Image: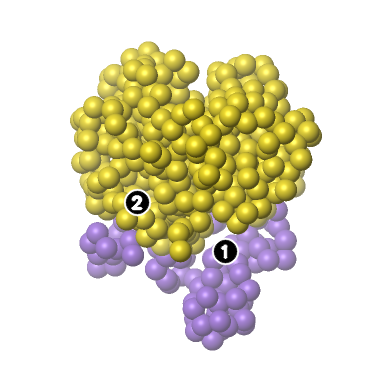
């Protein structure tokens, strides 16, 4: 069970919404996470950019992803930068849709010390006004078959 | 055709007073360092015909940025043929590389290059501020929101490079088995070196127990993995190589530079999160010289956080990829009397955060044989690295005969 009181009332610096990022930050209104995707070759672009580096396509538009991914790295922050003394987990989550498609985010609903690299996660949204912050929770039943090969070349 | 690097030398070096809270202006500190460097180069202020700084006026605020180049040009009434400043480029090294390019291209004969910080005074008695919270512009950011690249980290309470780099370190630890005991050796080695540097801000002994007893910032970084903000200015004069014969000390030659950046310049999208930009800058250095890592006598490798020094050890080929933990294990290899003395002045962790320029200065001190109790005997080749993370720059400096 997620313990929402662990994060719901915390301070967050909001993103400044504009025409290029509004789709991303408001995407969670229907429970889906979206990134820009190239219509020609299917490459996902993040942060938003008007040119596909894979095929040179210019036709890019927001498209929903599964919201599932894996913890690429995670740190437990202890410094009270925003006045909050409670440790919290900052992670890099790599989405299942594409190698290297990553978000810096928080892993919530769990003791941050228990989050480890290669954990399977899924998106949850924290709404504040117009903004839906895409955060992640650990999958309740990690499926080992979907774990990436821990081979050392996996970074490439 | 000889490389452009060989058309220049670092003819003079200067450093202001360095301290935790000097209460002096950035211009005042810059003038002190600049006059020392100009005199050291055997020149007068009127001989300076080029000016470069990193970064000069920037969104980071005055305490981080230092005085702009127009401010220093005006204060010294310089008549320059070329001038430059800015935050973008191969990290702090950009200012030096730009000066070497300008001299090599014939735009200037003697370029004054400086980097000034007053971050200790700005910090005051409080703790170190995160970006968007408590620091410069925080009130405006809280109401208007944060844009640009920082929107991908700050809203997730990743307020500091300490957190961004912690993610890099954690991935390295996970992939290669690197340990906190190994990481601690960077801090311990540099505190030992700082004891021999009268200008270092932290010189009292530091033990492994002290290290582990210090508070955690963001795993795996303890307090002693983070550099110490100071007030201070460092200046150099980059001159045409022909000026070497006019000096009363050894000239420092620029053997090669590493300015490459081939991965995405991003804290979360870089292809290999265990190396990031250091990989490309470090590799490039060896493409522009006949020297090899085995020829390097001292290595002054950026340490905004301890882990960056380990990244640079790998990126510059002093050990294999993923092997920096084993390389620094026990600390003997990187000690002043070790096979590769590292951050001989104490680095930013113990000598103070002069933001890359302290490393360049120390490389020159060592190559000129002026290191006193911390001098590495016979130092003729020095590796210098600045930055790390999404931007980085490196160079090899040599003692000219």
| Circles 2 and 1 on the same subunit | no
Query: Which chain has been coloured yellow in this picture?
Result: B
Q: Would you say residue A36 is visible in this rendering?
A: yes
For the point 71% across and 40% down, the residue is B69
Q: Residues within 10 Å of mark 2 (few under 14, many from 20)?
A: many
Position of B331 relative to A51 (above/below): above
For the point 46% across and 58% down, the residue is B3
Q: Is residue B253 left or right of residue B206?
A: right
The numbered dot on residue B315 is: 2
Q: Nearer the viewer, residue B313 or A156?
A: B313
x then y, percent, for residue B25: 70, 23
The numbered dot on residue B186 is: none
For the point 57% across and 72% down, the residue is A36
Q: Nearer the viewer, residue B150 or B204?
A: B204
Position of B264 relative to A54 (above/below): above
Q: Secondary structure at mark 1?
A: loop
Q: Nearer the viewer, residue B8 or A86?
A: B8
The numbered dot on residue A47 is: 1
Q: In which quarter of the view is residue A49 placed?
A: bottom right
Residue sitting at the far front: B245
Find chain A in the image and tell me its colour: purple
Image quarter where the C terminus of chain A lies is: bottom left
x then y, percent, for residue A9: 59, 39
Chain letter for mark 1, please: A
Residue sitting at the far bottom: A40
Q: Secondary structure at mark 2?
A: helix
Disc 2 or disc 1, which is closer to the eye? 2
Chain letter for mark 2, please: B
Q: In which quarter of the view is residue B92 placed?
A: top right
């Amino acid at each position: 069970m997620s313990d929402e009181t662990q994060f719901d009332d915390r301070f967050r610096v909001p993103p400044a919404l504009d025409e290029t990022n509004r789709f991303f930050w408001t995407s969670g209104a229907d429970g889906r996470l979206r990134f820009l995707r190239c219509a020609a070759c299917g490459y996902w672009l993040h942060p938003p950019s008007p040119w596909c580096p894979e095929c040179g396509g210019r036709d890019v538009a927001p498209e929903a992803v599964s919201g599932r991914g894996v913890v690429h790295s995670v740190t437990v922050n202890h410094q009270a930068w925003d006045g909050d003394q409670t440790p919290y987990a900052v992670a890099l989550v790599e989405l299942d849709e594409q190698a290297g498609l990553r978000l810096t985010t928080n892993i919530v609903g769990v003791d941050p010390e228990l989050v480890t690299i290669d954990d399977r996660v899924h998106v949850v949204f924290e709404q504040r006004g117009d903004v839906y912050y895409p955060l992640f929770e650990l999958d309740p039943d990690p499926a080992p078959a979907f774990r990436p090969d821990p081979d050392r070349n996996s970074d490439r | 055709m000889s490389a452009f690097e060989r058309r220049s030398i670092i003819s003079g070096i200067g450093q202001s007073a360095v301290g935790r809270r000097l209460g002096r202006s950035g211009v005042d500190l810059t003038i002190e360092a600049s006059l020392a460097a100009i005199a050291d180069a055997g020149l007068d202020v009127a001989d300076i015909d080029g000016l470069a700084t990193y970064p000069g006026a920037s969104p980071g605020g005055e305490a981080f940025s230092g005085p702009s180049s127009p401010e220093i040009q005006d204060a010294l009434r310089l008549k320059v043929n070329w001038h430059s400043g800015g935050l973008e480029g191969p990290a702090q090294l950009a200012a030096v590389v730009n000066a070497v390019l300008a001299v090599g291209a014939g735009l200037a004969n003697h370029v004054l290059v400086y980097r000034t910080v007053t971050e200790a005074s700005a910090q005051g008695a409080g703790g170190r501020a995160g970006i968007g919270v408590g620091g410069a512009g925080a009130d405006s950011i809280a109401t208007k929101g944060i844009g640009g690249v920082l929107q991908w980290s700050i809203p997730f309470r990743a307020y500091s490079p300490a957190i961004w780099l912690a993610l890099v370190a954690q991935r390295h630890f996970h992939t290669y088995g690197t340990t906190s005991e190994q990481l601690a050796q960077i801090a311990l080695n540099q505190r030992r070196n700082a004891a021999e540097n009268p200008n270092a801000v932290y010189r009292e002994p530091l033990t492994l127990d002290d290290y582990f007893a210090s508070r955690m910032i963001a795993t795996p970084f303890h307090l002693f993995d983070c550099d110490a903000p100071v007030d201070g200015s460092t200046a150099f004069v980059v001159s045409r190589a022909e000026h070497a014969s006019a000096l009363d000390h050894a000239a420092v030659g620029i053997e090669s530079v590493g300015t490459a950046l081939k991965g995405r310049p991003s804290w979360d999208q870089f292809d290999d999160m265990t190396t990031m930009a250091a990989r490309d800058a470090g590799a490039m250095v060896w493409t522009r010289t006949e020297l090899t890592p085995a020829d390097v006598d001292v290595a002054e490798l950026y340490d905004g956080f301890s882990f960056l020094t380990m990244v640079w050890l790998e990126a510059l080929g002093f050990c294999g990829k993923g092997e920096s933990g084993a390389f620094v294990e026990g600390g003997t290899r990187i000690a002043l009397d070790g096979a590769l003395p590292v951050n001989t002045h104490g680095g930013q962790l113990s000598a103070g955060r002069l933001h890359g320029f302290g490393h360049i200065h120390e490389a020159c001190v060592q190559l000129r044989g002026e290191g006193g109790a911390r001098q590495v005997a016979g130092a003729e080749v020095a590796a210098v690295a600045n930055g790390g993370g999404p931007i980085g720059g490196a160079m090899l400096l040599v003692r000219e005969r």
